Image (tube, rainbow, N blue to C red):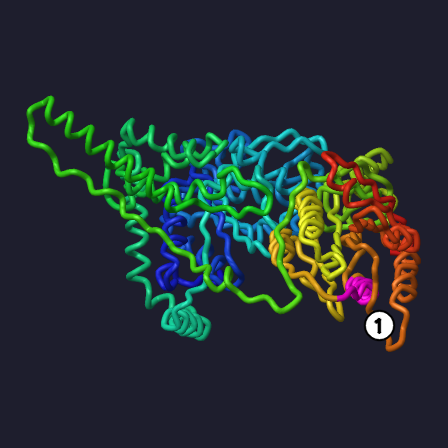
Amino acid sequence: MNRVSFPFSAIVGQSQLKTALLLCAVDPSLGGVLIRGDKGTAKSTAARALINILPPIKRTLGCAYNCSPNTPYDQCEVCNDAAHVIQDSPVPFITLPLGATEDRVIGTLDLERALKGAKRVFQPGLLAAAHRGILYIDEVNLLPDHLVDVLLDAAAMGQNSVQREGLSITHPARFTLIGTMNLEEGDLRPQLLDRFGLMVEVKAPQDKVQRSEVVRRRIAFEAEPVSYTASYEAQQTEFRNQVVQAQSLFAHVMLADDILDLISHLCCEFEVASLRADIVMHKVARALAALDGRTIVNLADVKNAAEFVLPHRRRRKPFEQPGLDKERLDELMNEAAENQNASRENEAQSNHEPQPEPQAPVEQSVSNQEQAGENNATQPAGEQIVSAALTNAPPKISVAMSANNHSVSGRRSQVGEVARGRVLRTVPHENPDSLAVAATLRSAAMRNTPEFSVTRNDLHQNIRTGKTANLILFVVDASGSMAAQQRMEAVKGAVLSLLTDAYQQRDEVAVISFRGEQACVLLQPTRSVEQAEVALRELPTGGRTPLSHALQLALELLEKTDIRHAPPLLILLSDGKANVALQDNGDPWRETLALAELLAERAIPALVLDTETGYLRLGRANQLSQAMGAEYLTLESLSAESLALTICARMGRV
């Protein structure tokens, strides 16, 4: 029984999101849409609701490749059968789970038919099922890198190529990619980000009337999904007819040369490197005109297309969020409108014809952000917030790993055996958790028995290789002993430089700060290094130095975190001048050394970054690094133009 989806027409607000999905329905070659936003903002609901307003497609009954009847795949047994039956079918909507194996996505050897004596029969995967349809990925930013590589190949070529287990198959795989993501879990790889034709930011409505209507509709749908969906059938039909009309009109929509020049001009002005942006903007502008029932693209279409296509392609620095300068876009569009009007006036004068009505400038939509409360906030006595002095180039952190089984996708540490990844080799195994089908069948065939059979002795295990992420725990001293503004600027700059490397390697990060009487967790472990960057930039300084509190909190956090799946790296930034004890009448420095020895016993790889400056130095941070068994660096060495830092992880007890 098919699950009933929430009606597309019943979604409250989210006009930009619904428009983006309709554009993908009009022109599937756009490349799909990336939907970004907080949890609970109807991202998945809208994506799944789209399928019910799409017109059906022609498809051969029983075809596993979703071939077009006009151009069937030459190796499709069903479509090339003279007795095949063509029927109207819903557009395929295939969900790609984050835990899917590579074999399930691209296809593999049909084990059942192989055991019956057939030779090298291919079993199509999810990419074949999504052909001519929609491939949906929830939380796409969490998709493992080896599956991202597969998607990039298929999206670039429009086909899926399988070269494995004695198979050599290439079949069409053209699909609309729809992905949702929450930035709290980290960003997408730039290559995959560029493959999404459009991007939409969604937020929950802040109007109480809208919010209550959302709840009212959702509760009614969950109570009676079938009858509730039927009550919106008239509106659903309107959307469906709009898509059908726009699809038929799209081929006739014209885009003038001056409009094309404007599209390229906008891409240059916003420093967009990818030429795909120009192509997609061209298509989106035409699709917008088709949805509006027009055959001529106007300036408003171009502006709307820019808001969909350019934000995620604009060249930006690490931690800088995608987006467009709306004021700059309005300026450029108004300049284009003035140039267009002047060109028409000149043309009218040269032809001695009545002048047409001048086109009004594109409506400006400048959103003024209120910052008074943020900029003028009063800081408590003894506190100050200083900016960061960034280093010239981010340092590179490399962590030597053991061969334990890790599963969090990342790019820092190469591991030899992972649950998911590319197959490195196959080995005999009586109880494999990742069956090597081809090797198993070869082993059974080589026994040359009269009757082919597979025994437990034939079973083989896939050994996969991949890269894993690390959990980088920043423990940052924000006490008064480091309150000198220039010194704190350098400390924040050093942390942000290290975060840049974590951002590029898709690490998990957590932040502990300590000042005053105790330490606190500023940021729980997350893949969103952007949140860590914000927390550190807004970190106040001043007060005493509860260093032992910070190390105890770091131990507690690491104990609660499953470090088997994200091996930790602790980076402590401090001058080591502890002066707040954990216990009454305790010695702060002795407590600190005792906790450092506990970290060393647990073989947690660490770096101590000494922030002490000046001619006379106590050298406490260096003593602390020796007790922790950690690498030791000074703030000056980290601020150098290049740095290769190797942490030799003793992972035996982790």
Q: Secondary structure at mark 1?
A: loop
Residue drawn where x is 79% and y is 54% of the image: 572
Q: Residue at x 33, y 42 (%)?
A: 303
Which residues, given as a range, are shown in magenta?
Answer: 544-557
- 172 or 207: nearer the eye? 207
Q: Is residue 568 visible in this depiction of the protein?
A: no
Relative to 428, say whether 550 is above or below.
Answer: below
Compare residues 389 and 654 and report the one nearer the observer: 389
Provide the residue designation for mark 1. Answer: 582
Residue 99 drawn at (x, y percent): 66, 52
| Residue located 66% across and 37% down the image | 392
Q: What is the crowding at mark 1: few (fewer than 14 residues within 10 Å), some, or many (at least 20)?
A: some
Residue kind at label 1, given as amino acid type: Leu
Residue furthest front as drawn = 615
What residue is shown at x 39% (from left), y 36% (from top)? 281
Relative placement, left or right, of 516 versus 319 is: right
Q: Position of residue 355 (x, y in %)?
A: 10, 32
